[in-house]
């Protein structure tokens, strides 16, 4: 498979492994009681901080659990004032730090910077995506072709689903040689070609239903005609000749065949499911009844602004929510996210947006939960300082309702918690003792089992959980040396086939460890790094 190369690629391909794992510190929660310090247990998260570090911090709880990811990264137009600031150990890359990425011609490494920024983030997003999950990436002509190549590397070519054209602008601009009217959305799914069996159909539109008529008053109701020939391999049983009521002889055109066996064809004729035209002289066609068609429509690769909204509509939405300002030049409309979430998620799915911007994704999720009673969860990550003042503030107003008079929009209800990135779990090769014990235990259990801790018992405070009949213990106390010895063994109450026990020291003999199927792991030496 052809691959793309660029300045710094060799240093960023595995950079996601070097990204420090930092804890997420909840700053406040928000719900029907307003903003408060108490944890409301909400699974909706808004995280302020570098999305590369934040994605790493989501792994212990969310690896392999995200059903739908939508990202709207910098398009790299030269007008976005974005800065490459990843801590990659390479002198060529360090020269870029703190510098605004320039426009085409003015900055000869602009594409290299963008690719270095995106690659490790896509690697972490791939880990977070569930086995039937789908990622949607909004881009334009500046980077979509490079993005396709690196996504092929990261997700695999068999995971590519489509490159959707979204008609994001319905007017006409005279600024360029050709008036731009579309963006792209790359779609990849770990389900690969099975995605067509798990994705959801779109609700039928009035325009589609209007194509169905009933000119012959068929008691089965509205219908339209469908093709009776199919292209492809010519099977012997599908290569017959028929005579129409007018006497016309009809055979499949070159390169095609009938869609049904001859016996089935005449059964359908008898059942009034085949039409030959008023004079009985037309090539036959199948009657497709509205009540028998599938419950919705297969998504197309071109999305009209009528169905997916457009940039001007998105600006109006923001203006209604923030009448005091329009905070973004090119926001995304909720219609676009509605389409994506409808296609690629279930009512109880987790949706992630790691370039959250104004918070359109969460707005769409809350709207859909209100409409269908779903319990979708949403995780937003925004690194800019407006994460609280705009991203979170938008969600507060959506929850409570906004606007006045005829423009008043009722609240969706719902809740979320707001987080900041905390300290890393490691300080050099040692554990960072400023991190709470619960956060360390959560991290260690995930590195062992890829599972989240769900157990807590004060009678066995060092017990983390049992996975595949192995019980895990983390014998750690911040201000003391812990020892795996016989006294500690007497505190174990959980029965299992084997045990993994972390401690600072171990005084048990190898024979004793083998006798009780214990694997000793030394703190911090044997704690894996994500």
Image (cartoon, rainbow, N blue to C red):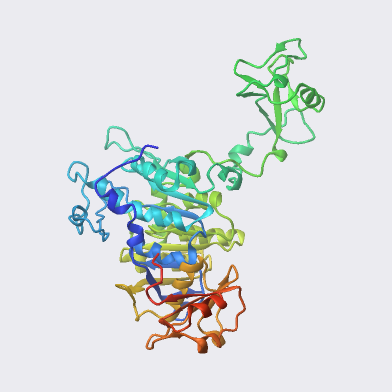
Q: Residue furthest front?
A: 511
Q: Is residue 201 visible?
A: yes
Which quarter of the rendered picture does the C terminus lie within?
A: bottom left
Pick the front one: 154 or 206: 154
Pick the front one: 317 or 442: 442
Q: Is residue 407 visible?
A: no
- Please tell me whether residue 75 is drawn above or below residue 457 in the rendered image: above
Q: Name which quarter of the figure residue 145 lies in.
A: top left
Which residue is at a point 81% across and 26% down the rendered structure image? 267
Q: Is residue 182 left or right of residue 271?
A: left
Q: Is residue 248 left or right of residue 133?
A: right
Q: Name which quarter of the figure residue 471 lies in.
A: bottom right
Across and down, in percent, residue 213 comes to: 69, 32
Question: How many tags in the picture?
Answer: 0
Across and down, in percent, residue 482 comes to: 42, 85
Across and down, in percent, residue 161 comes to: 49, 42
Which residue is at a point 53% across and 68% down the rendered structure image? 413
Which residue is at a point 28% across and 32% down the rendered structure image? 177
Q: Is residue 508 left or right of residue 498?
A: left
Across and down, in percent, residue 506 comes to: 44, 82
Q: Is residue 115 left or right of residue 157?
A: left
Which quarter of the rendered picture does the N terminus lie within?
A: top left
Which residue is at a point 27% across and 35% down the rendered structure image? 176
Pick the front one: 391 or 526: 526
């Amino acid at each position: 498979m052809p691959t793309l190369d660029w300045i710094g690629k060799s240093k960023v391909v595995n950079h996601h492994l070097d990204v420090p794992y930092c804890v997420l510190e909840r700053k406040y929660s928000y719900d029907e009681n307003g903003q408060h310090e108490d944890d409301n247990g909400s699974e909706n998260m808004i995280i302020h901080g570098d999305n590369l570090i934040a994605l790493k911090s989501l792994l212990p709880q969310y690896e392999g659990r995200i059903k739908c990811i939508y990202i709207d990264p910098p398009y790299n137009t030269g007008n976005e004032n974005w800065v490459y600031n990843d801590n990659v150990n390479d002198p060529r890359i360090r020269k870029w730090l703190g510098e605004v990425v320039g426009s085409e011609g003015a900055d000869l490494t602009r594409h290299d910077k963008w690719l270095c920024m995106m690659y490790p983030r896509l690697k972490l997003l791939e880990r977070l995506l569930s086995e039937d999950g789908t990622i949607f990436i909004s881009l334009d002509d500046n980077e979509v072709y490079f993005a396709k190549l690196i996504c092929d590397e990261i997700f695999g070519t068999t995971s590519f689903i489509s490159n959707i054209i979204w008609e994001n602008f319905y007017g006409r601009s005279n600024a360029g040689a050709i008036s731009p009217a579309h963006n792209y959305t790359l779609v990849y799914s770990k389900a690969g070609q099975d995605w067509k069996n798990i994705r959801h159909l779109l609700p039928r539109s009035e325009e589609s239903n209007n194509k169905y008529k009933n000119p012959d008053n068929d008691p089965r109701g509205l219908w339209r005609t469908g093709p009776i020939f199919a292209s492809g391999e010519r099977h012997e049983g599908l290569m017959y000749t028929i005579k129409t009521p007018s006497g016309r002889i009809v055979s499949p055109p070159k390169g095609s065949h009938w869609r049904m066996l001859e016996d089935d064809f005449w059964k359908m004729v008898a059942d009034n499911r085949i039409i030959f035209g008023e004079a009985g002289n037309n090539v036959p066609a199948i009657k497709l009844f509205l009540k028998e068609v599938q419950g919705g429509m297969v998504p197309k690769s071109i999305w009209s602004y009528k169905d997916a909204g457009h940039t001007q509509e998105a600006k109006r939405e923001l203006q209604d929510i923030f009448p005091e300002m329009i905070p973004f030049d090119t926001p995304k409309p909720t219609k676009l996210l509605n389409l994506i979430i409808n296609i690629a998620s279930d009512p109880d799915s987790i949706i992630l947006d790691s370039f959250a911007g104004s918070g359109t994704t969460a707005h769409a999720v809350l709207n859909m939960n209100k409409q269908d009673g779903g319990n979708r969860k949403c995780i937003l990550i925004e690194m800019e300082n407006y994460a609280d003042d705009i991203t979170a503030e938008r969600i507060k107003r959506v929850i409570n309702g906004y606007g006045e008079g005829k423009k008043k929009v009722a609240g969706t209800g719902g809740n979320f918690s707001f987080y900041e990135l905390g300290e890393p779990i490691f300080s050099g090769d040692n554990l960072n003792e400023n991190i709470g014990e619960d956060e360390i235990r959560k991290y260690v259990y995930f590195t062992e089992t890829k599972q989240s801790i769900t157990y807590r018992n004060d009678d066995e405070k060092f017990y983390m959980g049992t996975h595949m009949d192995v019980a895990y213990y983390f014998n750690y106390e911040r201000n003391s040396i812990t020892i795996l010895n016989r006294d500690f063994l007497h505190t174990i109450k959980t029965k299992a086939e084997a045990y993994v026990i972390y401690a600072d020291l171990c005084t048990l003999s190898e024979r004793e460890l083998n006798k009780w199927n214990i694997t000793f792991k030394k703190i911090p030496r044997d704690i894996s790094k994500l």
